[in-house]
Amino acid sequence: MPLPPHLSPQLWQEALTRLRAAVGPDALFTADEDVTLYRDAYSPVWGEPEERQASAAVAPNSTDQVQAVVRIAHHFGIPLFPIATGRNLGYGGSAPNLSGSVIVDLKRMNRIIEVDDKRHFAIVEPGVSYFDLYRHIQERGLDVWIDVPDPGWGSVMGNALDHGVGHTWSSYRDHFGSHCGLEVVLPNGEVMRTGMGAMSSAKTSGDFRYGFGPYVDGLFAQAGFGIVTRMGIHLMPRPECFLHRRVLAYRRQDIVPLVEVANKLEDAGLVGMPLYESPMFGAQFADKALRDIATASDVWNGNAIDRYAAEKTMPAWQLGLSFYGPAEVVEASWRHAQAQFAKAIPGAKFETIETLRFPLSPQAEEEALHKVLIGVPNLNIFAIGARSATNPEPADGHLLFSPMVARSGEEVMKAQRLFTEGMREMGTDFPMSYGPFTAPFTWMPRIFALTTGLPVSRSDPKVNQRSRETMRKLIELGARHGYGEYRTPPLFQDQVMGTYDFNDNALRRFCETLKDAVDPKGIIAPGRGGFWPRAMRKEA
Amino acid sequence: MRWFLLAAALSSAPALAADAEPQGQAIFIRNCAPCHGPGIGNPGENQKPGTAALAAKYGGKLPALLEERRDLTPELVAFFVRNGATVMAPYRKTEISDADLVALGAYLSRNNPKFSGRKIRKTS
Ligand SMILES: Cc1cc2nc3c(=O)[nH]c(=O)nc-3n(C[C@H](O)[C@H](O)[C@H](O)COP(=O)(O)OP(=O)(O)OC[C@H]3O[C@@H](n4cnc5c(N)ncnc54)[C@H](O)[C@@H]3O)c2cc1C
C-alpha cells in the first residue's frame, strides 16, 4: 500500500507505533490484506495508477481516541480520511481523496447516545447504522420513525455528511438538513460542539440547531474541516397510518401538470416523497416496438409515446404519493389530491397501492411493499445491479451521476433529451441510463435528481475507462446547462467543484482560504469536496 | 474431547467455541440476511437480492439460500466476506472481525458433511 506523501519510512514506523499505542493493537490495520478492504469496491479506476488507496487504517472507539489520532497525524503531517461505516458505494466507497491517507474508521464508535420520543430526536456516534438505530427504537417500543436511504447498512451520520437522502417527508429525507448539532474533532485535535452543544450547560443540542453566531455545521459535510464524533438528528413521530396511492397519466406532456400539482401538495405538507416512474421504462425492454419509439430521433415530440399509451392503455407516467398521519386526515388529503390531479390532467386515473396501520407485526413489516417509504431499513435495492434472470452477467457496481434539475416537467423533458442525445454523441450506449422514460428522483426535497449509474468492473479496465470518460463528459455537459452534481466520488470532486464557477470559482477559493486557515497541513481529508490546502493545490 | 484438541492443534484456525454456531447465526442475521435471507424484496422481486442472485447463478443446482447450502466451507465464506462479489462490497474487520468470521464460517458450513470441524465437534 502507498505511504503517506513526503514521509520517510522511519517516521512512518514511528507514527504507527504511536497510533497503535493510542488505539490498541487490534484497532490499527497495516497489513495489505486489511488495508485493501478500504479500497472503493465500486472504483472506476480499480487497479490503475489513478486509484486512491490508503496507507493504513485506524479505528478509534471514543472521541478521546479520535483526538489522539488527529494529534499524532498533525505531528507527523499525515493526512487522515474519516469514514463512518464507509459504505458510500457509487460515491467513493471508503477510499480517500489522497493516496497514502490513513483511514479513520469510526465503525467501532457505534453508541446511540439518546433517542427522545417526546421531543423526536436521536444523538448518535458515527458507527451507528440505520439498522442499528431502527433496532434500538423497535426493541424499546419508542414512538419515533427514522428516515432511511435505500441501503440500510450505511451510517446515519456518514450518509448525512455526504448530503445523503431518504424517502419520507421533506423535512426528514434531507439527512443533513435534519441533523441537529455536531461534536467535531478539529484538525489540531481540539473538540468543538456546534449549535446548543456549544453551551456546556444546555440540554437542547438535539432540539435547536443554530445556537448563536454563524452556523458552521455545513463545513463538516463533503469537506475536510474536522472529524465528526457525534451528531443529533431530528426524527418524526410514528404516524397512525400510511397510504400509498398512485396517479396514472397517459400523455408525455402530462408530466408538466403532474409535477406542478405534486409540488404544491408536497410544499404544503400534505404528501411525503413523490415517487415518479414511467411504466414504459421497463416495458421498452419487453416490447421492441416501444424500444424503437424510445430510440427514434423524433420521440421528444411525444406523439408516438401518446399513441402507444392510448393503444396499450399504458401510462406514460405514474406518480406514487405517500400520506402519513391519522386515518381521517390522510384519507381527506388523498381525496383532495385526487381532485387536484383530476382537474389538471384530463383522463388521469387513480390506484390504491397500500394502506398500513402502525405498529406493524413483523410479518406485515416483511410484506410491506416499499420499506424505505415507511422508514424500515433493508438492502432490497441491491436487486438493481445484482445478478438475476434478466441480468445474468452483472457489473461489479456503479458510478453514480447525479445532476440536479429544477422541479418542473419541462425541465425533466429537457434534461432527459440533453443527456440521452449527449450520451449518443459520446457513442456510449447504456440502455438503462437515459431516455424519454427516465423519471426524476425526488429524494432531495425541492429539487429533482436525474441520477443514473455507469457500470464499473474489477476485472475489465475497458469498462471503467468508458464509464470514467462518460462521467467526465456528463458532468461537463450538465454544467453547461446548469445541472450541477450534488455529490460525486473523490475522482471527480475537483471537476465538479470546478463547475460551480460563479465569479471565477469564488466558492472554491473561499473554501481554500478556510482550509489554509483551519488545516494548512491538510490533515483532515485534503481534497474532499474538491478543494485543497495551499501546499497541495495544483497551481502551488 | 481429545479428538477436538488434536484437530484444533493440527488446523491453524482458532479453536471453535461450543457456541460458535449460534454466534455465527446471529452474525448472519445481522449482516447477511438482509440480502441472503429468505423473504421478499422490493416490489416485483419475490426474493432478497443475494438470494435471487444465487438462484440465477446456480439455476436450481444449489440452494439459493446460503443457510441451506451443504457445500460451503469456512474458507469459502471467508473469501466472499473479505472479497465481495459483483455488487456486494467486502466487509472490513471493524464490521465482521476475524473471530466473527470464524463463527460465521462454522454456522454456514454446519450442513456440510465434509467439513471436518463439524465432525470434530460431534465426536468431542
Ligand atoms: C444501490 C445503491 C443505492 C443507494 N441509495 C442511496 C439512497 O437512497 N440515499 C443515499 O443517500 N445514498 C444512497 N446510496 C449511496 C450510499 O451507499 C449511501 O449514501 C451510504 O449511506 C453512504 O455510506 P455510509 O453511510 O457508510 O457513509 P460513509 O461512507 O461512512 O461516509 C460518507 C462520507 O462522509 C464523510 N464522513 C463520514 N463520516 C465522517 C465523519 N465522522 N467526519 C467527517 N466526515 C465524515 C466522508 O467523506 C465519507 O466518505 C446508494 C448506493 C447504492 C450502491
Image (tube, rainbow, N blue to C red):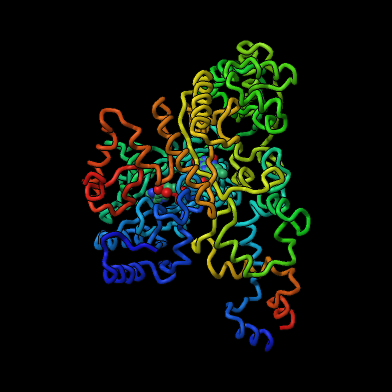
Find residue A507 and report its horizontal and vertical position in percent.
Answer: 29, 34
Residue visible at 69% across and 38% down in the picture: B43
Taking the image as drawn, is residue B48 in sight?
yes
Residue visible at 47% across and 46% down in the picture: A465
Q: Is residue B93 above or below residue A335?
A: below
Quarter-of-image position of residue A30: bottom left
Taking the image as drawn, is residue A245 in sight?
no
Find residue A365 and report its horizontal and vertical position in percent.
Answer: 68, 43
Q: Is residue A162 above or below residue A331?
A: below
Q: In this view, does A371 lie to the left or right of A448?
A: right
Quarter-of-image position of residue A377: top right
Residue visible at 61% across and 26% down in the picture: A295
- Foreground residue, A155 or A268? A155
Residue visible at 72% across and 32% down in the picture: A286
Q: In this view, does A342 lie to the left or right of A427?
A: right
As drawn, the residue found furthest toward the right would be B60
Q: In this view, does A313 lie to the left or right of A43?
A: right
- Foreground residue, A280 or A343? A280
Quarter-of-image position of residue A150: top right
- Foreground residue, A297 or A245? A297
Q: In this view, does B68 lie above or below A296?
A: below
Which of the image's four quarters has the N terminus of chain A? bottom left
Find residue A281 and report its horizontal and vertical position in percent.
Answer: 64, 30
